Amino acid sequence: MLKKITYYLYFIFGLIKIVFADNALILQTDFGLKDGAVAEMKGVAFSVDNQLKIYDLTHEIPTYNIWEASYRLYQTASYWPSGTVFVSVVDPGVGGSRKSVVLKTKTGQYFVSPDNGTLTLVAQKFGIDSIRQIDEKYNRLKNSTGSYTFFGRDVYAYTGAKIASGKINFFQVGPLLPLQKVVEIPYQRAEFINGKLEGNIPILDVQFGNIWSNISESLVARANIKKGDILCVEVRKGQEVRYRGRIPYVNTFSGVEPDEPLVYLNSLMNISLALNMKSFSNKYKIYSGPDWAISLEKCN
């Protein structure tokens, strides 16, 4: 009896939320804008609700780069309010065995995506409230069941639009996943260990070639590193050392001469490397991803 009452209360609460739903739909893909794929996704979303607010995160994720998709969600989501629905489609396994899911975070946002590693960083940063597998019998574009290669349009944009517009509540997405875990991509977590800061290079500041890490300002403080210190920096891809040098820790690019290296805090308040008015990435052939690591400490 109590189970029945709980079910009905949940259902009624869902209906109330549907009436007042007015949330943004944010799209991310690796499709680019050379063809009509993104426009098709937006058209499907508008067909669900032509008052829907749809925004682009990016459609320039490098093809099949699940890690970068994961990072761009992590980078962006905290600046959007609770209730925002993110649809991320970087799906090299489209039509295969990977699950189509909606992750609700503890911050009240929704992430619609294949469960292929894309949700690694948002799950870790914002916490998992619950995860549901999309029931494609009810949450799939009408007359699309013969298509096996465009889940971004037929399943993800369609389901995301239904959630954002309030046509369905989270309960109606589909069944809860029993383990309530997402597929995770392994990488070097940021840590202060044995007197040294260790971290990952998740992404580049692509326009300028700066090297962004996941090492936070608070970890820098734990290491007792201060502005003006000279840091011994090492960058590795796997076990291969790609860069080793002594670099000053300064506030901004003009803290060193043109072409000189610097360590600074980026806009996410994480440690980054740069060359003043040049590309650190291009000069030293340093890139980003789960297999790239960085370490730094005060030089003796």
Image (cartoon, helix red, strand yellow):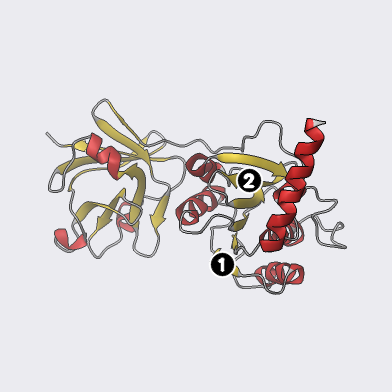
As drawn, the label of residue 9 is none
Q: Is residue 133 above or below residue 146?
A: above
The image position of residue 250, as x and y in percent, is 17, 53
Three-letter residue code for mark 1: Asp
**Image spot of residue 248 (x, y percent):** 16, 49
| Residue pictured at 50% horizontal, 44% vertical | 126
Q: Is residue 95 visible?
A: no
Along the line of sight, the residue nearer the viewer: 214 or 124: 124
The amino acid pointed to by label 2 is Leu
Quarter of the image where one finds residue 196: top left
Given residues 238 and 250, the one toward you in this image is: 250
182 displayed left or right of 134 = left
Q: In the image, residue 151 lies at what x, y percent?
A: 74, 56
| Residue sitting at x 65%, y 51% | 113
Residue most extreme to the top: 194
**Mark 2 or mark 1, whichever is nearer to me:** 2
Residue 255 falls in image quadrant: bottom left
- Please report the residue visible at 52 percent of the width from the left and 46 percent of the height from the top: 122
| Residue under label 1 | 56
Quadrant containing the C terminus is top left
Number of residues whose C-alpha sits closer than 10 Å to that of mark 2, classed few (under 14), some (14–19) or many (20 or more): many
Secondary structure beneath dot 2 equals strand
Q: Nearer the viewer, residue 92 or 162?
A: 162
Mark positioned earlier in the residue sequence (2 or 1)? 1
Name the residue carrying label 2: 103
Q: Secondary structure at mark 1?
A: strand
Q: Position of residue 234 (x, y in %)?
A: 28, 39
Image: 287 above or below 59? above
Quarter the N terminus occupies: top right
Query: How many marks are shown on the rendered structure?
Result: 2
**Which sits in the foreground, 123 or 99?**
123
